[in-house]
Amino acid sequence: MFNRRKFLKASALSTALLAVNKNSFANDIQKSTSIKNQPIVISTWDFGVAANADAWKVLSKNGRALDAVEQGVWVPEADETNQTVGYGGLPDRDGRVTLDACIMDELGNCGAVLALEHIKHPISVARKVMEKTPHVMLAGDGALQFALEQGFKKENLLTPASEKAWKEWLKEAKYNPVMNIENKLYDKAAPQRLPGNQYNHDTIGMIALDAQGNLSGACTTSGMAYKLHGRIGDSPIIGAGLYIDNEIGGATSTGVGEEVVRNVGSFLVVELMRQGYSPEDACKEAVMRIIRKKPETAKNIQVGFLALNKKGEYGAYAIQKGFSYAVCDTKKQDLVIKGKSYY
Ligand code: SD4
């Protein structure tokens, strides 16, 4: 029979245990941060290597993690051969390149732009939203107007290669937004994204820990190719595509954003690390939530999480095989790791 006193005693005990766990993790962190911090930067996909290298230029000079992540993700944003981030990104179904990005610092400040057009570096506009306005997010025309007021240049972001791919798609115009070619199902749907093309991957999410022991993160993407105009994924949503808590760690995601938003994925990963999960286990549990809720959907989509904790430990987990991430620290500058996956 249900015994209220026993129940209260048991829940008080588990709260106490939780408090002990939490404190021991906090103590561990304190110990590790009292040692001089080793900077580290991690980011999604193989193209993260080049992005990390630029972030490292900041971190290796004792620079701030926030500057490192902004500078790092500029690399894929400016790379026209990368058709999933920034300039050269594949357009929406109306042929418009709309970009999503967000940034978060060690103080919990954050900024984001949603469906921003014509600006090559949406991450820097997101940073301006964070630093120059009392707001967190600006969308569409308002985001563009703000960017122009801040001195950003208006550019055409649709490159001939992306325009050609879109026109190919228009022939059938089948509304089957494609993402993550490592899932074979998408090879047929997106023949321009064939394996072997090192730039055929998606969003860049980057997290850095600087020599002062502070964390920051950035996430930037052109989103789903041929999406409905105005569709927003997880990438510019704080808590979904990116989350940083300077006491615990940071997380970011890539893949089908709708499932990440439904589960507030990156926030979940950070909260699991707060409970004592390792970065990889936290990412795995966040992936398992998606799989448990929608096992049939999950079979055919990719979602990957990547996390870094305050001690500089990192890990990742994805639904499908093929998710990779790049790591750069004092020991190795161009490490690419294949993330573990459920399938
Ligand atoms: C989105 N999560 O727009 C992004 C796209 C992505 O790997 O990350 N693809 O839903």
Image (spheres, rainbow, N blue to C red):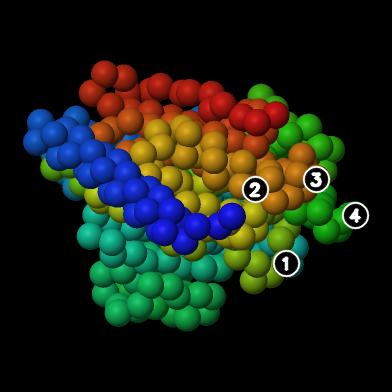
Q: Compared with residue 2, is residue 22 higher up or lower down, i.e. above or below? A: above
Are there few (<14), some (14-19), or many (20+) residues within 10 Å of tag 4? few
Comparing marks 2 and 1, which lies closer to the viewer? 2
Comparing marks 4 and 1, which lies closer to the viewer? 1
The N terminus lies in quadrant: bottom right
Are there few (<14), some (14-19), or many (20+) residues within 10 Å of tag 3? few
Q: CA distance from mark 4 to mark 3?
A: 26 Å
**Disc number for residue 41:** none
Q: Amino acid at mark 2?
A: Ile
**Disc number for residue 290:** 2
Where is residue 295? Give x, y as percent: 76, 44
Instruction: Give whichever of discs 4 and 2 has the lower sequence position.
Output: 4
Contact between labelled residues 3 and 2, with CB atoms less than 8 Å apart: no
For disc 4, the marked residue is 172
* Helix, strand or loop at mark 4: helix
* Helix, strand or loop at mark 1: loop
Q: Amino acid at mark 1?
A: Leu
Contact between labelled residues 1 and 3, with CB atoms less than 8 Å apart: no
Instruction: Give whichever of discs 4 and 3 has the lower sequence position.
Output: 4
